[in-house]
Structures are given as C-alpha cells and as structure tokens.
Image (cartoon, rainbow, N blue to C red):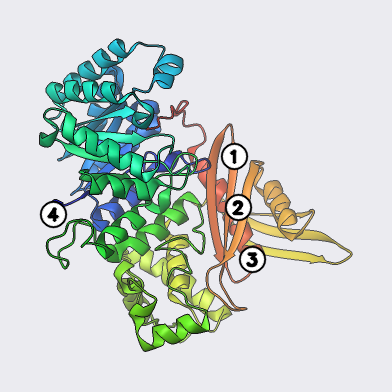
Amino acid sequence: MSSEKIRIFDTTLRDGEQSPGASLSIAEKLEIARQLAILGVDIIEAGFPVSSKAQFDATHLVADKVQGPVITGLARANEKDIEAAANALEPAKNKRIHTFIATSPIHMKYKLKKSSDEVLKMAINAVKYAKTFTDDVEFSPEDACRSDTSFLVEILTAVIEAGATTLNIPDTVGYVLPYEYGRLIAHLADNVPGIDKCIISTHCHNDLGMAVANSLTGVRNGARQIECAVNGLGERAGNAALEEIVMAIQTRTDFFGGADEKKPLTNIDTKQIYKTSQLVSQLTGFLIQPNKAIVGANAFAHESGVHVDGVLKERTTYEIMTPQSIGLGGSRMVLGRHTGRHGFVERCKQLGFKLSDAELEQAYQRFKEIADKKKEVFDEDVAAIIGDETHVVEKIYELKYIHVVSGSGVLPTATVKIKVKGKMKQAASCGDGPVDAAYEAIREATGQSPELENYSIRAVTRGKEALGEATVKISRDGRIFIGRGISTDIIEASARAYLDAINRMVSVSGKDEGPEIKAEL
C-alpha cells in the first residue's frame, strides 16, 4: 500500500449540521472551523452556500477568517449553485468547489427525472464551469454505491476529462458492507482512465453502522481522502466519525501502509481530538454517549477487576492507545476555592484553551462561584465553565434569582427575577414539576413562549457535588435554537439553559434568512 498521506475532509459544518435538531449560528460555525484548523484537518466543507443566506454568510466568513485548510463549498450540478459557492469562497486562499449529481437509477428516475445521458452532460458542464473559478474541483456521484458500475466508470472518466481533481464515492444511504465498498473503490481505481491523477475520496453514512469500517476499507483499496464529521454527526444515523477514523489509522499505521510506524499517515494533531469533540457537542447540543469510541466518558475507563489489575501491571494489556494521545491530561489537577487566578489560567492553558483576557476574567469569576459550592473542581468542570461563559450571545434576558418550591403533595412553584435591558422583572408560576414551573415563570417574565422540543440534564463529573449541565432545544417558526446552562443546582442549570436558548432565538428574530435547502451525499 502507498504511504502517501491520507487527507481528512471534515464535513461537520455542512453534513454534520444537517443532523436533525442540530443548529449552529454563524459565529459558532466560525469557532468550530477555527478549531478544525488547529486540529489539522486538510479540508473544511464550510457549507452549502446556495441553500440559504445564513449558509452563504457562514461559508464566506470561514473562507475569510480561517487559514490553513482548503475551504470547500457544496454545489449541485448547475450554474446557480456553483456561482454561489464561488462567491462564498472568494476570500479563501485555498478553495475548492464540490459539485455533485445523483447517478443511481432510483435517484435519476424518481428525484431528478432525467436520463443517464442528461445526468452525464450535467456533470461534465458542472465540472467545466466550476473550473472557471478554481483549479480544485471535487465531483461526487450521489448514491454511487447503488449506481450501475459501468455508468460510474463512464461519468467519472468524463468528469476527469472535464477537470475534476478529486473523485468522491458516496455511500449516501449507508447501504453497502465493507467488502462491497472496498471492491467498488478497487474496481474504479483499476478501470477509470486518468484516475491515477486524481484523489479518490470516501463519504460513508452510518445507517447500518458501517461508516467507519467502509471508509477504512476504501483507504485499503486506494482512497486517499476520507470525508467525515466530528462525533459522527450527519443525516439520519450520521457520517463516519472523524475521531474514530483518525485514531484507527494512527493506531494501525502498520495495516494502512505506513513505511515508518512512527510517522503519522494524517496531518491531524490527535491531542486536539477531545477538545474538538467537546466543542462540537456543546455547540450542537448533541451529547456524547458514554460508550462512544475514542471520546466517550468510558473510552478509557476500567471497572472489571481483571482489567484493572492488568492495566495497573502493564497499560497495554487493555489499552491500545493512551488518553493523552487524544488530549486528555495524564495527571488530573483538582482546583478549589483557594485556587488563585494564576492556577486557573495555567490549567486552562494546559487543557488547550486559548482565551482572551476578557474571556478568562469572565470564566474565572464563574469558576469562583462554582468553587464556593463544591469542594473540588475537575478538568471536565473547567471545560464546561469555559464553554458556558464563552459561547454566549448577547444577554438580553439574564437570570438574577430563582426560587423553587416542590415536593410530595406540594404544587411545584417557581419565582424568578430576570434582568431585561437594565430593568428587573419578577414572575411566579406553577407547573407539573420544578423545571416546568421555572420555565413557565421565565415565559411570563420574558414574554417569550417558544416550543420546548427537547430537554436533557447530565452530570459533568461524578459525585454528589457534580456540576450539572442542562441542554435545551426550543423552536419558533420551524427554527431550532439550542441553549446550555451549568450549575451545581440542576434547576438553576435548567433555567440558565432555557434563557440561553431564548437569547439565541431573540438575537436572530427579524433576520429573514429564507428556507434552507438540504443536500445529502
């Protein structure tokens, strides 16, 4: 196998954000893009510019502000989409237009209502038009794995002649199994004229739980780019998970063709994986399951007596990689109420957070509040505090006081005081439970009554003094807004999360962004 570097194409901001319920503001997309650049991804698919004004603006901002990776915009095989992508990508130093059209019989007949000859012509014209804006053009035959193989060979040959430089082979509906996908990649590599001058890419969905396995099998058979998303986000069951792809390649360099096992086959700084995973989880509101590979809370936990005994004697008996390799600290520093500013700042640096003086001050003040309520503040608490204090929008509504009465045989009642543009508003209300009562009181005080779509609460760390993190999803006019809040009191955390979501909702009210078109590969 070739020891050529494997390119990591991240689609968290495009396909990942299409996860049902996921919603990112333009500022949040930029924050994730900057972290992806620090992580070391080779290509960032910043969005689908033609689909909405917000998508266009986010892609343009990422293209303008993020240095290092190639910035990519998605476009269907028509001039309007391609022009929108080109305009959005205009500020980027390194840019790529990614155009696609469906090639499977079922898609051509029922979705496109076009013949294979018409699809072939559209693909050629799209690539030629994209080449007038940039030399770096990627082409994807949507639903490639259910397409006729001879037609795939024909259309890929044609787009290479038209100027395509990357050929992506999507398993759009997560249908094929690893052997089949590897065989398809190998067949195309052997039978498409000129494909040796292009990069073959994978883009696998996880409907049958095969996205990572299929992607890696593609690499074994000649692919040198993998399209994936942080935490496996994406349509339906999601995409191949970036963190699993990268650590599989790093852990098994011998299997993937590395001539030197110490020389990485990707450009990823794996010590940034955990931080990136947490950031995406916090901003999208998608919690990471404890048994999630690589980044789950239990990924490096050992409870079985036999396992613990083995790890204590020799780590490699049960661990094939180290927590440090993904950015989890080897030594856990415990902070407390007596920790000064310097100690807090140093721990933030050790955890990989780069904050402005204002952000550090804000986070430190919140840290002191938390430290007064719990004896020990762990790394996970610090990460949650920073996430809560730095990922905020303008606080139009600010919680100043909450009091809840609840218990067996007692009607749950909540009283809140909320600062609204310098003025204090107080409201009291009853509900089915303490959280419902608090939310009713907040609705009365703010005059805002969005639909509550989802609510969850989790303990950031273990123990009775654990910091609680609440995540709330609300909706208005079909748009989803996600809010987060932390506190040692779960009712306060819930109230903070609800107000955070309302502030996000109000901050975009009146901004007509139009309906967003969804695109899937």
Q: Earlier in the sequence, mark 3 or mark 1?
A: 1
Of the residues shown, which amino acid type is indicated by label 1? Ser
Q: Residue at x 33, y 78 (%)?
A: 316
How far is the residue under mark 3 from the one under mark 1?
22 Å
How far is the residue under mark 1 from the one under mark 2?
12 Å
Percent x, y of residue 207: 48, 42
How far is the residue under mark 4 from the one under mark 2?
50 Å
The residue identified by callout 4 is 3
Q: Quadrant of the C terminus?
A: top left
| Residue 125 to residue 420: above or below | above
Q: Residue at x 31, y 59 (%)?
A: 248
State left or right for residue 240 relative to residue 385.
left
| Front-lying residue, 236 or 367 | 236
The residue identified by callout 2 is 498
For label 4, count other residues whose C-alpha is less than 10 Å away and answer few (under 14), some (14-19) or many (20+). Answer: some
* Foreground: disc 1 or disc 2: 1
For label 1, count other residues whose C-alpha is less than 10 Å away and answer few (under 14), some (14-19) or many (20+). Answer: some
How far is the residue under mark 3 from the one under mark 2?
12 Å
Of the residues shown, which amino acid type is indicated by label 4? Ser
How far is the residue under mark 3 from the one under mark 4?
51 Å
The answer to which image quadrant residue 520 occupies is top left
| Front-lying residue, 175 or 397 | 175
Q: Which mark is residue 65?
A: none
* Foreground: disc 3 or disc 4: 4
* Foreground: disc 1 or disc 4: 4
Of the residues shown, which amino acid type is indicated by label 2? Tyr
For label 2, count other residues whose C-alpha is less than 10 Å away and answer few (under 14), some (14-19) or many (20+). Answer: many
Q: Earlier in the sequence, mark 4 or mark 2?
A: 4
Task: Name the secondary structure under disc 3.
Answer: helix
Q: Earlier in the sequence, mark 3 or mark 4?
A: 4
The residue identified by callout 1 is 475
Task: Name the secondary structure under disc 4.
Answer: loop
